[in-house]
Image (cartoon, rainbow, N blue to C red):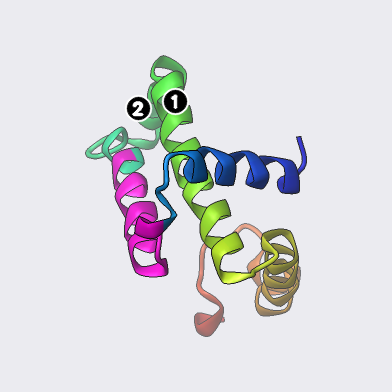
Amino acid sequence: MTCEEITRRILKFRDVRDWKQFHNPKDMAIAISLEAGELLEHFLWKSAEESEAICAEKRPHVQDEMADIAIYLFELADNLGIDLLSAMEQKLERNEIKYPVSKSKGKNTKYTDF
């Protein structure tokens, strides 16, 4: 399924329920944040190793939370007229400049601290 196809399916789901009236940018951003919080709950107080195990053990739950985030994000992008794939491509290009391999390879340092 393409981004356009999944977006159309998301919008159809929303529209047949007459929910667009509730899906303003503020509430969509809050919904994304809330779903991200639900995703984070699976990892709270867990080590890196425990987090890996949780991803395997609770995969359907983790997958559902990730899908919720993506669904809201795709809808918000459509509502705002943002081509999400293009925005991601542009952001990756900017990140390639901010995080050149010569300075960032194998490091978790923020670009402002190079």
Q: Is residue 11 left or right of residue 98?
A: left
Which residue ends up furthest to the top in the rendered image?
A: 57
> Which residue is most to the left?
45
Q: Which of labels 1 and 2 is toward the front?
A: 1
Q: Which corner quadrant holds the N terminus?
A: top right
Question: What x and y, as percent, mark residue 69?
Answer: 46, 46
Q: Is residue 37 magenta?
A: yes
Relative vertical location of residue 63 with respect to residue 101 in this rendering, above or below: above
As helix, strand or loop, the secondary structure at mark 1 comes to helix
Give the residue at mark 1: 55
Residues 10 and 39: in front is: 10
Q: Position of residue 46 (x, y in %)?
A: 28, 34
Quickly name the residue at label 2: 50
Q: Which residues are magenta?
A: 21-38
Left or right, residue 12 beside residue 38: right
Q: Which residue appears at 51% of the width and 73% of the height?
A: 110
Please tell me whether residue 56 is drawn above or below residue 72 in the rendered image.
Answer: above
Q: Quadrant of residue 92?
A: bottom right
Local crowd size for mark 1, using a 10 Å CA cut-off: few (<14), some (14–19), many (≥20): some
Q: Say whether disc 1 or disc 2 marks the residue closer to the N-terminus.
A: 2
Please name the amino acid that badge 1 sits on. Answer: Cys
- For the question of whether residue 107 can be seen, the reply is no
